[in-house]
Image (tube, grey):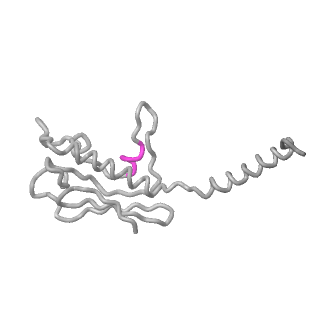
Amino acid sequence: MKKAFTLLELIFVVVIIGILMGVASSSFKSDYLSADAEFITIKIRQAQYKGIGYEHKVFGSDTAPVDYINGCINLEKSALGDSSVDGKVSYKLHVDNFNAGTLCFDAKGRPHDTDFSPSTLRSDTKVITLSYNGKTKDISILSLSGFAIIECN
């Protein structure tokens, strides 16, 4: 009667488990498009929260760059993708190049163009289209609330 496994049997079991793990791990691919859409949506929400309750006046100069005004976000891959903390890249975008311009939010969280006048409140829904490996997703920014929604195509 045999009470234990031999070393050869244990090695074969470990090799078979390793092969199964290798096959299983290759089937789990990262969904870069969804991750990038979530990242951009979070950045848009951060800009909206900075804009709520902020007095959009540039004291002493009318030529201040838009990037330095609270409540605005530059929606370009180069501006969003390489944000670094202490010299380390925190997130790198994988989507193809996109350029949706600059989006600002007023004190009520509504999206508008960059000059902060009531006449430039957006009456349309701004849509940012992201694409990666032939798949696309749209981020819609609602005109009344400024809420960003990710839509699958």
Residue at the outermost top position:
86
Q: Nearer the viewer, residue 129 or 11?
A: 11
Residue at the outermost bottom position:
153
- Horizontally, residue 77 falls left or right of residue 147, namely right
- Horizontally, residue 11 falls left or right of residue 62, namely right
Residue at the outermost left position:
118
Q: Considering the whole magenta stretch, tell me its main secondary structure.
A: helix
Give me the residue at 88% from left, 44% from top: 2
Give me the residue at 45% from left, 46% from top: 92
Give me the residue at 86% from left, 44% from top: 8
Q: Which residues are magenta?
A: 77-82
Quarter of the image for residue 84 reads top left
Quadrant in which the C terminus appears: bottom left
Quadrant in which the N terminus appears: top right
Q: Nearer the viewer, residue 123 or 17?
A: 17
- Horizontally, residue 86 falls left or right of residue 75, namely right
Quarter of the image for residue 71 reads top left
